[in-house]
């Protein structure tokens, strides 16, 4: 991508290195160009909500909406240090260059450099993985527009139509050491999904067989425990995190990207409100305060749901079920949350 001019916010993405001047200054540096980084960059400029089912469409839409005033750097942040004089953060890049920023927002995903700087605990692995894919039915799939989930033993399958012709689906199963190799080869991913779903209805097997091979992903599931989110120190000085860098959970509720967009809206609102009063640290503390309990609730519901799918004793499963029924009896209550306007 090309670098755009004008520089109040800088937007840093982990792609090929790009020549830069040594130690430029900026007001806000956003590390990461996924859903959260793009939504944060956009929220700092706009006041609209965006929702979309297909990740690639959402990313493209966000990229198209970014104003030209946002500078873009295609380079990887390797470390963050505090300036000994001003205490403002300095981002160091893989090519040796650096940027000094008043604020750094880490939207750099599951292996976040910014969350390491904040001393947050790394995400833990679940024993399961997900295979995701899309299947295109040129003459229409004829399915109802609803999300369906099925389970046979330890294997789960879900599907939801994207439109009249395209269906998004996933297969959840136990992770095995061979999956590191399988995940690199789409044909092997399809074979593995077919092997796992042999005793599911024929239409499911057919959907996987006819999938768009280029869309297949096999990923091991990782999560931040609810107590890490409850006690995590999400801001130090003028550095904070958002999206998966702040809260990673398994996709059982399908809320990771939605929560990342909420982070972006709340963060932009807090920064806009407080910067006009020229306070530097307060906006990030307010942002963390406003987000924490929402994230704890989402991660707890996801954690308990995940525990039901993990191999464990009957007592643990029963306890998780009871907790879900008591605290999350409205299973879709989380979808009606309103994070407020920009
Ligand atoms: C199997 C699966 C299914 C899911 N299903 C759903 C769903 O149905 N609904 C939903 O809402 N969510 C879902 N999610 C979650 C969703 O995909 C994530 O929550 C979302 O993508 C997080 O966005 P993000 O921008 O925080 O992180 P990412 O999408 O990981 O983006 C991080 C960006 O930062 C960049 N980066 C990383 N390190 C650096 C660095 N050092 N320097 C510069 N750039 C860097 C990366 O290149 C990347 O572009 C699912 C996740 C999985 C794994």
Image (spheres, helix red, strand yellow):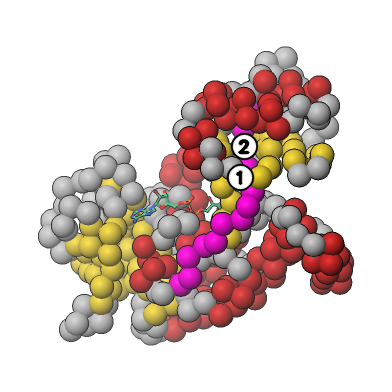
Q: CA distance from mark 1 to mark 2?
A: 14 Å
In the rendered image, the quadrant that contains the C terminus is: bottom right
Residue at the spot of label 2: 132
Q: Is residue 192 left or right of residue 156?
A: left
Task: Find residue 209 and report its image quarter.
Answer: top right
Which of the pair 179/58 is nearer the observer? 179
Q: Nearer the viewer, residue 299 or 267?
A: 299
Q: Position of residue 86 (x, y in %)?
A: 22, 82
On screen, residue 137 above or below 229: above
Most frequent secondary structure within the magenta stretch: strand
| Ligand 1 lies under 8 Å from the Cβ of mark 2 | yes
Range drawn in magenta: 120-135
Residue that carries the numbered disc 1 in the rendered image? 175
Q: Earlier in the sequence, mark 1 or mark 2?
A: 2
Q: Is residue 104 visible?
A: yes
Q: Is residue 125 magenta?
A: yes
Query: Callout 2: 10 Å neighbours few (<14), some, many (20+)?
Result: many
| Residue 40 in sight here | no
The spot of residue 59 in percent (x, y) is: 49, 43
């Amino acid at each position: 991508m090309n670098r755009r001019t004008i520089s109040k916010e800088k937007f840093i993405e982990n792609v090929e290195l790009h020549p830069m001047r040594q130690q430029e200054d900026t007001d806000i540096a956003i590390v990461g160009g996924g859903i959260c980084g793009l939504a944060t960059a956009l929220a700092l400029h706009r006041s609209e909500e965006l929702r979309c089912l297909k990740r690639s469409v959402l990313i493209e839409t966000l990229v198209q909406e970014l104003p030209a005033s946002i500078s873009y750097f295609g380079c990887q942040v390797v470390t963050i240090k505090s300036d000994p004089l001003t205490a403002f953060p300095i981002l160091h890049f893989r090519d040796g260059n650096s940027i000094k920023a008043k604020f750094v927002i880490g939207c750099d995903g599951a292996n976040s450099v910014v969350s390491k700087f904040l001393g947050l605990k790394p995400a833990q692995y679940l024993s399961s993985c997900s295979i995701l894919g899309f299947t295109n039915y040129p003459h229409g799939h004829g399915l109802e527009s609803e999300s369906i989930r099925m389970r046979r033993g330890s294997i789960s399958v879900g599907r939801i139509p994207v439109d009249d012709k395209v269906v998004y689906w996933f297969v959840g199963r136990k992770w095995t050491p061979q999956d590191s190799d399988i995940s690199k080869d789409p044909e092997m991913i399809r074979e593995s999904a077919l092997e796992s779903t042999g005793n599911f209805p024929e239409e499911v097997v057919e959907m996987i067989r006819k999938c768009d091979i280029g869309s297949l992903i096999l990923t091991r599931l990782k999560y931040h425990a609810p107590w890490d989110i409850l006690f995590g120190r999400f801001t130090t000085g003028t550095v904070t995190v958002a999206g998966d860098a702040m809260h990673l959970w398994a996709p059982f509720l399908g809320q990771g990207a939605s929560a990342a967009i909420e982070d972006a809206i709340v963060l932009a609102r807090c920064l806009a409100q407080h910067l006009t009063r020229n306070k530097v640290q307060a906006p990030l503390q307010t942002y963390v305060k406003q987000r924490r309990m929402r994230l704890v609730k989402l991660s707890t519901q996801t954690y308990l749901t995940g525990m039901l799918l993990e191999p464990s004793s009957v007592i643990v499963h029963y306890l998780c079920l009871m907790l879900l029924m008591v605290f999350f009896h409205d299973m879709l209550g989380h979808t009606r949350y309103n994070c407020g306007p920009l």
